[in-house]
Image (cartoon, rainbow, N blue to C red):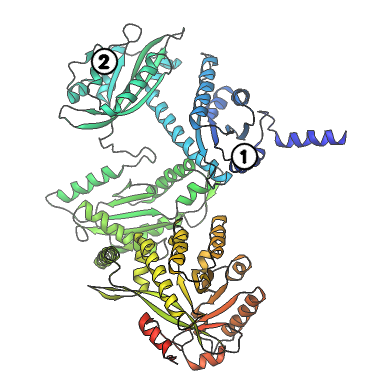
């Protein structure tokens, strides 16, 4: 009896009372289990996140009981549709999570569409319309993804649909206002003038079809007749006539969308295609429409709008600000006036804004952008106008040139708003803003250079800690151009058999005997124009440009070849090779390392790969798998720059390091600092307790060596034992059994 009671209690804890589906927690647990099953069974897993439309409006207009009834009705439909081993959970107020093992995306799409059609038919014509939006994610059995990531992908997909739904709703609201609203029916107006007024007030092309009389005849606005060379406004067999203008590759999509209306399979029309205008140009169009029915459900009117996507709309619909096209037009107008007055421009960028989208969702992110636009716009001085650029960026034009002090004051006011956490819809978030500013026409005299120079200054703000304002200076552009030039030279070198590249070896010695036991392979590059370029400059450029993968392969292969040569002189010689985090994210690099070891026929124990502490501290599953595979090859792993990160001691517990390299920063004051000496001794003891060898970097003098040689270190590296040397010189020194000591 007690066992039955326990089972009942457990079921109650997992069930959502209103919908009788699983609750959120149980749904998440179920998703985790199904992801694991999908991997074991090598099968697909389709997941849907469903959100009921307009539930807030239903609650407001008809009461919460009506809203609850809608939730129950949708939940019941989802539940009845479930097949064996499929699950549904109520995720939040009006959201549901459905899990479909071994199902394709199209099948689930069709099933959800049937549910919506059923709900539409069942809805009382005098009440509200029940519908929902959904996002689907198909998880492959080989795909490594968490339940949270799956839900986020579904949410992103659902957000796109939800956004289209609200845009369509807004577009149709004009017609619905006149056709459905009780107050509007009591309001008297001339219906014959309605179409003319709509045509005159929009840049879109309007079309109307009286489906009750002739569903093949359409009326098109005069602007569309003129733009596409149609024979007249009223066209019989309109689908055939208009279809002649549509691109061959888009004909199928056009016909399928029209058949869905003609066959009464859909009341909504939304399709994009290319059409040729009267000038012979192909332009992208978005055609949207809606079918109105009489009380018996028969179609009586089909009307909508065709939008020319190539036209530049001036308003950003998310924030209500003017968009980047209007910004560019305004700048051009200001610069082409006969008496051009100096003016200033500021670029604002929300730092790490993607984190808000990841932590919450894109819908909330859009709301934050809209609120941020309102907040900043409200504090701008007179004569300043704000524009939405792309993503999380905004421009501000100051009609009169502002001094640096004035712009600093404006930016300080902006920073003051965001000095603390913000709150929106009961959710807290924090943002900072990086900015750039310049004066026109002194700093730039056209739109392109204004954008470029602002970007140079913004990059400077980002590189120097973010949350700051940087004024453009000509040197920034020169620095950027030099970087781009260096990248092109690096690319040329790599494509021409790595001309200018070389490997230098810096000796690593036994801490007690001072005998060479190995070396660190260090890349060097000489430019034909700039001469020897320091690694601190060209390595980040290789990473930034994506060239690090090719360069890294060359470095690894050369280092292994040189190491094999050295083993003929010193049989136990080992080489340490630095790996970039970008190389480690390349799934093919591990196979490349294995191939090189096989080709060179070298014992892998002679090879050590170095990774920075900041990379190794991440400790995610994919990273641990990579470390395991590297060690399975017989290659050892060294943790470089140890002691400079934020989790140095903690990372030792889980890190797969065979060797820890204590950063040279702890050698700087070792002769006078008790802290540095104590830290080195402590790390040596800690590492030895877990069978990790320790190498100390940065030993440059005899006094420093005498200070550290009694600390129990395994290896030492530094100028005292030798600076980095070209390989042939390093090899010769070893053959002569000499060093730089």
Residue closest to the eye, 714 or 560: 560
Seen at 57% across and 82% down, the residue is 714
Q: Which picture quadrant has residue 684?
A: bottom right
The picture places residue 283, in percent across and down from the top left corner, at 24, 32
* Farthest-out residue, right: 1
Q: Are marks 2 and 1 in contact (CB under 8 Å)?
A: no
The picture places residue 318, in percent across and down from the top left corner, at 39, 39
Query: Can you say whether 669 is above or below 661 in the image?
Result: below
Precedes in sequence: disc 2 or disc 1? 1
The picture places residue 675, in percent across and down from the top left corner, at 59, 83
User: Which mark, residue 191?
Assistant: none
User: Circle 1 — which element?
Assistant: helix
Residue closest to the eye, 512 or 258: 512
Inspect this view and state whether residue 349 appears: yes
In the picture of the structure, the residue carrying the numbered disc 1 is 34
In the picture of the structure, the residue carrying the numbered disc 2 is 238
User: Left or right: 493 with respect to 592?
Assistant: left
| Neighbours of disc 1 within 10 Å: few (<14), some (14-19), many (20+) | many
| Neighbours of disc 2 within 10 Å: few (<14), some (14-19), many (20+) | some
Inspect this view and state whether residue 66 appears: no
Seen at 14% across and 48% down, the residue is 337
Seen at 13% across and 52% down, the residue is 339
User: Circle 2 — which element?
Assistant: helix
Mark 2 or mark 1: which is in front?
Answer: 1
Query: Can you say whether 538 is above or below 363 in the image?
Result: below
Label 2 – label 1 distance at C-alpha? 50 Å
């Amino acid at each position: 009896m007690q066992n039955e009671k326990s089972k009942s209690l457990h079921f109650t804890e997992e069930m959502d009372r209103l919908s009788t589906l699983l609750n959120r927690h149980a749904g998440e647990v179920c998703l985790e289990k199904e992801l694991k099953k999908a991997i074991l069974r090598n099968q697909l897993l389709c997941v849907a996140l469903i959100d009921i439309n307009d539930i807030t409006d239903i609650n407001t207009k008809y009461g919460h009981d009506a809203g609850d009834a809608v939730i129950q009705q949708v939940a019941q439909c989802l539940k009845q549709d479930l097949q064996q081993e499929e699950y549904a959970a109520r995720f939040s107020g009006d959201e549901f999570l459905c899990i479909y093992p071994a199902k394709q995306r199209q099948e689930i799409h069709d099933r959800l569409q049937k549910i919506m059609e059923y709900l539409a038919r069942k809805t009382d014509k005098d009440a509200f319309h029940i519908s929902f939006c959904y996002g689907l994610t198909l998880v492959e059995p080989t795909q490594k993804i968490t339940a949270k990531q799956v839900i986020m992908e579904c949410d992103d997909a659902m957000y796109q649909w939800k956004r289209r739904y609200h845009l369509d709703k807004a577009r149709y609201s004009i017609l619905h206002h006149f056709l459905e609203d009780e107050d509007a029916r009591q309001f008297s107006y001339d219906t014959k003038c309605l179409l003319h007024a709509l045509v005159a007030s929009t840049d879109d092309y309007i079309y109307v079809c009286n489906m009750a009389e002739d569903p093949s005849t359409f009326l098109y606005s005069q602007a569309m007749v003129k733009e596409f060379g149609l024979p007249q406004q009223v066209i019989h067999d309109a689908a055939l006539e208009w279809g002649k203008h549509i691109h061959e590759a888009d004909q199928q999509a056009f016909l399928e969308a029209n058949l869905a209306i003609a066959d009464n399979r859909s009341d909504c029309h939304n399709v994009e295609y290319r059409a040729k205008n009267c000038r012979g140009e192909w332009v992208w169009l978005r055609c949207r429409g809606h079918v109105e029915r009489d009380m018996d459900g028969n179609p009586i009117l089909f009307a909508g709008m065709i939008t020319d996507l190539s036209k530049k709309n001036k308003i950003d619909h998310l924030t209500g600000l003017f968009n980047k096209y209007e910004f560019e037009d305004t700048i051009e107008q200001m610069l082409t006036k006969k008496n051009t007055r100096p003016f200033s421009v500021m670029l604002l960028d929300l730092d790490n804004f993607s984190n808000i989208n990841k932590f919450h969702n894109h819908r909330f992110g859009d709301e934050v952008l809209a609120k941020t636009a309102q907040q900043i716009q409200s504090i701008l001085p007179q004569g300043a106008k704000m524009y939405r650029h792309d993503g999380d960026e905004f421009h501000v034009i100051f009609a009169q040139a502002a001094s640096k002090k004035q712009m600093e004051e404006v930016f300080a006011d902006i920073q003051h708003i965001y000095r603390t956490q913000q709150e929106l819809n009961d959710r807290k978030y924090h943002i900072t803003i990086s900015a750039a500013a310049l004066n026109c026409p002194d700093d730039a005299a056209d739109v392109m250079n204004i954008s470029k120079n602002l970007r140079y200054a913004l990059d400077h703000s980002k590189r120097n800690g973010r949350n700051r304002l940087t004024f453009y200076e000509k040197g920034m552009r020169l620095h950027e151009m030099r970087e781009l030039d260096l990248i092109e030279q690096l690319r040329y070198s790599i494509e021409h058999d790595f001309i200018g590249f070389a490997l230098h070896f810096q000796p690593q010695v036994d801490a007690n005997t001072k005998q060479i036991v190995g070396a660190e392979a260090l890349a060097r590059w000489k430019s034909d124009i700039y001469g020897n370029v320091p690694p601190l400059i060209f390595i980040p450029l290789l990473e930034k440009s994506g060239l690090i993968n090719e360069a890294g392969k060359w470095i690894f292969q050369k280092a292994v070849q040189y190491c094999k040569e050295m083993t003929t002189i010193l049989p136990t010689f080992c080489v340490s090779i630095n790996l970039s985090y970008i190389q480690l994210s390349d799934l093919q690099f591990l196979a490349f390392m294995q191939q090189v070891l096989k080709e060179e026929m070298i014992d892998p124990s002679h090879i050590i790969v170095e990774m920075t502490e900041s990379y190794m501290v991440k400790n995610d599953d994919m990273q641990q798998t990579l470390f395991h595979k590297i060690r399975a090859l017989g290659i050892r792993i060294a943790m470089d720059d140890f002691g400079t990160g934020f989790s140095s001691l903690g990372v030792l517990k889980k890190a797969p390091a065979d060797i820890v390299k204590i950063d040279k920063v702890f050698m700087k004051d070792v002769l006078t600092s008790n802290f540095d000496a104590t830290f080195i001794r402590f790390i040596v003891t800690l590492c030895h307790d877990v069978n990790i060898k320790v190498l100390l970097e940065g030993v440059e003098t005899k006094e420093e060596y005498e200070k550290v040689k009694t600390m129990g270190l395994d290896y030492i590296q530094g100028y005292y034992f030798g600076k980095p040397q070209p390989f042939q010189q390093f090899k010769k020194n070893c053959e002569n059994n000499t060093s730089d000591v």
